[in-house]
Amino acid sequence: MLKKTRNTACVVACIVALGGMAQAEEVDIQAVLDAAMPHMHHSCASVLETYPDDDDAVAEIVRQMAFVSIYNRQLDILALVPDEAEREGLKDEFVEELEDSCDDDPGKLLAGAVDMAVKNTMAAYD
């Protein structure tokens, strides 16, 4: 299970990803895919077991997976959520969604949990 403090670290990194992907032309998606691929085998639980004392590594892995999800879903965060204050609220919603997904099934692939968290977080803005 993802711990609350780890979720917060992951979400902060992921929200940066959410905002960054709004300008996809500035992102080298191949570099993001190359960086994310070695971690795609991780479950919610195994990533924490592999990096037990490294919240930054977990946050980076989640950020990479969020980039991939946002890119694959062709989301333009700035267009969907133009108000900066509302974009700040994405963080709390994403944390809740990721926690729920990982708490329900710690063996779930982390990439799947992140993708569902991105999908559910952004569904309110479609």
Image (cartoon, rainbow, N blue to C red):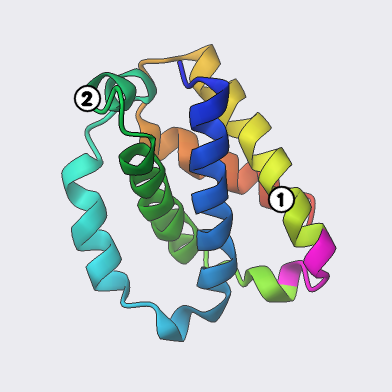
**In the image, residue 13 lies at what x, y percent?**
49, 51
Q: What element carries label 1?
A: helix
Q: Mark 2 points at which residue?
A: 50
Residue 73 versus residue 107 in the image, above or below: below
Say what amino acid the circle numbered 2 marks.
Answer: Thr
Say what amino acid the circle numbered 1 marks.
Answer: Leu
List the single residue furthest toward the front: 53
User: Counting other residues with Cα less than 10 Å from the Cα at mark 2, is it few (<14), some (14-19), or many (20 or more)?
Assistant: few
Q: Name the residue under label 1.
A: 90
Asked if residue 82 lies in the magenta stretch, the reply is yes
**In the image, residue 49 lies at what x, y percent?**
26, 18
The answer to whether residue 117 is left or right of residue 89 is: left
Q: Which residue is drawn at 26% across and 52% down?
A: 36
Residue nearest the observer in this picture, 126 or 3: 3
Asked if residue 99 lies in the magenta stretch, the reply is no
For marks 2 and 1 on the same chain, the one whose residue lies earlier in the sequence: 2
Q: Residue at x 19, y 61 (%)?
A: 34
Query: Is any part of residue 126 visible from this angle?
Result: no
Range of residues picked out in magenta:
80-85
Locate residue 57: give its quadrant: top left
**In the image, residue 23 lies at what x, y percent?**
53, 80
Q: Residue at x 46, y 52 (%)?
A: 66
Real-space Cα separation, disc 2 to disc 1, in angstroms: 27 Å
User: Counting other residues with Cα less than 10 Å from the Cα at mark 1, is it few (<14), some (14-19), or many (20 or more)?
Assistant: many
